[in-house]
Amino acid sequence: MAQNSGEHEALLSDESYTRRVALESGDIDETWVHSSALDSAARASTTAEHELHLRDAVKQYPQAIFWSFFFSLAVLMAGFDAQLVTSLYALPAFQRRFGYEYDGRYIISAAWQMALGMVS
């Protein structure tokens, strides 16, 4: 629904009819619209959004694009983190820095492995 400046609309559902209340300068204009008209308007709006090109969608919904990217990256990194941290145990530099020498080799203690596993 288009909102003009100074005009606010509210939709109140009542079984198969929907009441549209427009508040304009304190005057209340009340009309009843059949739900099928509202359904067709919703379908038309959905179709228009599905036909948007990528550039137009980015211009029209920049916040939605940002949050979608942010949470997708967070999910990706959460899955990647578990694999990355456990692969560090095999790196010689990591073993020398955080491990201790045992029989001529450096190993990571079970306490360190558990702590890093629990953090990630």
Image (tube, helix red, strand yellow):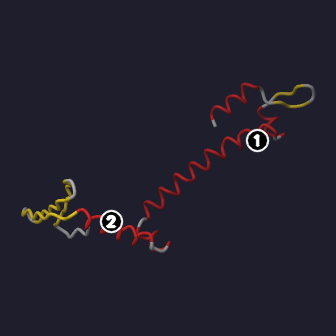
* Left or right side of 11 for 81: right
User: If you read the primary sequence from the N terminus, does the residue marked by circle 1 or circle 2 appear first?
Assistant: 2
Q: Is residue 117 above or below residue 49?
A: above
Q: Residue at x 35, y 67 (%)?
A: 43
Q: Are marks 1 and 2 in contact (CB under 8 Å)?
A: no
Tag on residue 12?
A: none
Residue 58, percent from left and from top: 46, 69
Label 2 neighbourhood size at 10 Å, few (<14), some (14-19), many (20+)?
few
- Quadrant of the rendering where the C terminus is positioned: top right
Q: Residue at x 31, y 68 (%)?
A: 40
Hey, what amino acid is under mark 1?
Ser
Badge 2 marks a residue whose secondary structure is helix
Q: Is residue 34 above or below residue 100?
A: below
Distance from the alpha carbon under mark 1 to that under mark 2: 50 Å
Q: Residue at x 67, y 41 (%)?
A: 82
Residue 115, percent from left and from top: 67, 29
* Left or right side of 15 for 105: right
Q: Is residue 30 above or below residue 98?
A: below
Who is closer to the viewer here, 21 or 34?
34
Label 1 neighbourhood size at 10 Å, few (<14), some (14-19), many (20+)?
few
Residue 64 occupies which quadrant of the picture?
bottom left
Q: Residue at x 64, y 45 (%)?
A: 79
Q: Which residue is mark 1?
A: 87
Badge 1 marks a residue whose secondary structure is helix
**Quick one: which residue is furthest to the left in this view?**
27
Q: Which residue is mark 2?
A: 42
Instruction: Please tell me whether mark 1 or mark 2 is closer to you in this view.
Output: 2
Hey, what amino acid is under mark 2?
Ala
Residue 91, percent from left and from top: 81, 41
Residue 104 occupies which quadrant of the picture?
top right
- Quadrant of the rendering where the N terminus is positioned: bottom left
**Quick one: which residue is furthest to the right in this view?**
104
